[in-house]
Amino acid sequence: QSVPQAGDWSLAIGGAFNQTPFVQIRYVSQTHSGEISSNQEWLGNSLHTVTGNITVDANATLTIDPGAVVLFEPTVGITVNGTLSASGNEAEPIVFSSSHDAAAGANIPSGLPAPAPGDWAGIFMNGGIAMFNHATVRYSGYTSGGGWNPNAGALNVQNSGMIVMSNSMIIQSFFDAVIAWGSGHVSLVNTIIAGCDRGIDPDGSSMVGLTNCVIDNCR
């Protein structure tokens, strides 16, 4: 008998669902797309498939719980005008990856290609704030024209946005791991960047700080 995994079953709520603090939902599969206009929480130890672009509005917070696996279908990503909080822990890290990534929990039908850099678009802080702890971001970097642009990174910040990342990894981005374009603040602590075209791309008045980080196999 196999151990339980994120995505073993699905949850569809057609009416009211009143969850008390004494109820935990684990190993469920859910899909997401579109605008997030109010605070929203994505369950931990669950599989979340992003089927269309997501925008977190300026007054909204998207909280991703420890152990969540977030897989993106080709070409899609998240734009954060508000707040994204993805705080895992050592035992329950959070994964952002391609929907082709079987190692992350994707159920890959026969014949689909293996995951590759550029499978999905990345996470964009458009004046918003993103906080990552014990998180992994891999196989991002898709752009609509196929060439580099200021939003081509796995993580992108502009318009005075902010990225705070610790104890995390950014792996196999097709272009840059982090782009700070024009303005914005990036703080990386105890973070590994590997297998990307470029590690960090700061521009203009942006501020980037790295503490105890490793950048490997990037030009």
Image (tube, rainbow, N blue to C red):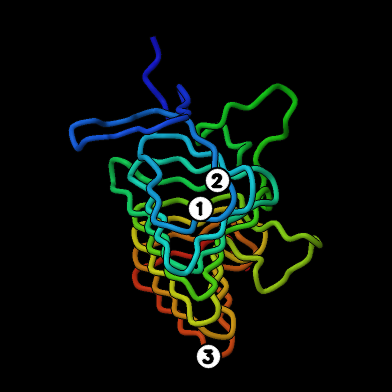
Counting from the top left corner in percent of width and height, residue 61 is at 40, 60
**In the rendered picture of this protein, how many numbered marks are placed on residues?**
3
Residue at image x 53%, y 85%?
A: 183
Helix, strand, or loop for circle 1? strand
Residue at image x 58%, y 47%?
A: 33
Q: Is residue 50 left or right of residue 18?
A: right
Residue at image x 28%, y 46%?
A: 90
Label 2 – label 3 distance at C-alpha: 30 Å
- Give the residue type at disc 1: Val
Helix, strand, or loop for circle 2? strand
Q: Is residue 88 left or right of residue 216?
A: left
Tell which of 205 and 53 is nearer to you: 53
Q: Earlier in the sequence, mark 2 or mark 3?
A: 2
Q: Quadrant of the N terminus?
A: top left
Label 1 – label 3 distance at C-alpha: 25 Å
Residue under numbered circle 1: 137
Q: Do callouts 1 and 2 mark residues in contact (Cβ within 8 Å)?
A: yes
Q: Residues within 10 Å of mark 3 (few under 14, many from 20)?
A: few
> Can you tell which quarter of the image residue 59 is in?
bottom left
Residue under numbered circle 2: 97
Residue located farthest toward the front when viewing the structure as drawn: 15
Residue under numbered circle 3: 205
Residue at image x 44%, y 79%?
A: 185
Tell which of 190 and 186 is nearer to you: 186
Counting from the top left corner in percent of width and height, residue 192 is at 44, 59
Counting from the top left corner in percent of width and height, residue 190 is at 34, 63
- Give the residue type at disc 2: Ser
Q: Quadrant of the C terminus?
A: bottom right
Q: Earlier in the sequence, mark 1 or mark 3?
A: 1
Q: Is residue 159 left or right of residue 90?
A: right
Q: Earlier in the sequence, mark 1 or mark 2?
A: 2
